[in-house]
Image (cartoon, rainbow, N blue to C red):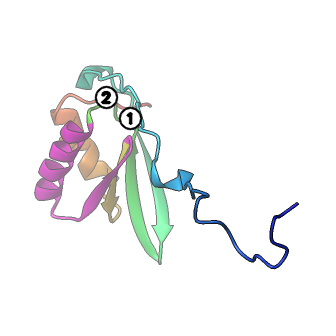
Amino acid sequence: MKENLFEIGAKFEDTWSSDNKEKPAKNKTIEVKAPEQHQLYFAKEKRRGKVVTIVKPFHLEKQELQTLLKTLKKKLGTGGTAKEDSLEFQGEISEILRGYLEELGYRFKK
């Protein structure tokens, strides 16, 4: 029971701890593969009435995936983004994209 019955609120001696400040580090190990060992496939989605071409799964480091994205965006002249193990491009460009990726040595599922 409390010493003072009319005491309201927390005591200043009590400490407040917040567990949501620290996020656990993601130690996701990525198995990096050579372009010849990839088995890529295409997926198409519609977002806000527009077609998005998705190529996945890439087994590359994040930095390598970003540089690949940058070169492909320059060649294709479209926008795109890299997400986890996939590349997303604006528009329906799967045939052209397949040609560029095959030139770089990547393989596709049949």
- Disc 1 residue type (three-letter): Leu
Residue named by callout 2: 107
Q: Name the residue nearer the viewer: 29 or 101.
A: 29
- Disc 2 residue type (three-letter): Arg
Residue occupying the point 40% across, 36% down = 57
**Quarter of the view holding residue 62:** top left
Q: Position of residue 43 (x, y in %)?
A: 46, 50
Task: Label the magenta part by its dominant secondary structure.
Answer: helix
Q: Name the residue nearer the viewer: 7 or 40.
A: 7
Q: Residue 86 carries which label?
A: none
Neighbours of disc 1 within 10 Å: few (<14), some (14-19), many (20+): some
Q: Position of residue 72 (x, y in %)?
A: 17, 50
Residue occupying the point 38% across, 56% down = 53
Q: Where is residue 13 in the image (x, y as percent from the top left)?
A: 59, 59
Neighbours of disc 2 within 10 Å: few (<14), some (14-19), many (20+): some
Give me the C-alpha separation between circle 2 and circle 1: 6 Å
Q: Where is residue 88 in the image (x, y as percent from the top left)?
A: 35, 55
Residue named by callout 1: 40
Q: Do the residues labelled 2 and 1 touch (CB within 8 Å)?
A: yes
Residues drawn in magenta: 62-85
Q: Quadrant of the C terminus?
A: top left
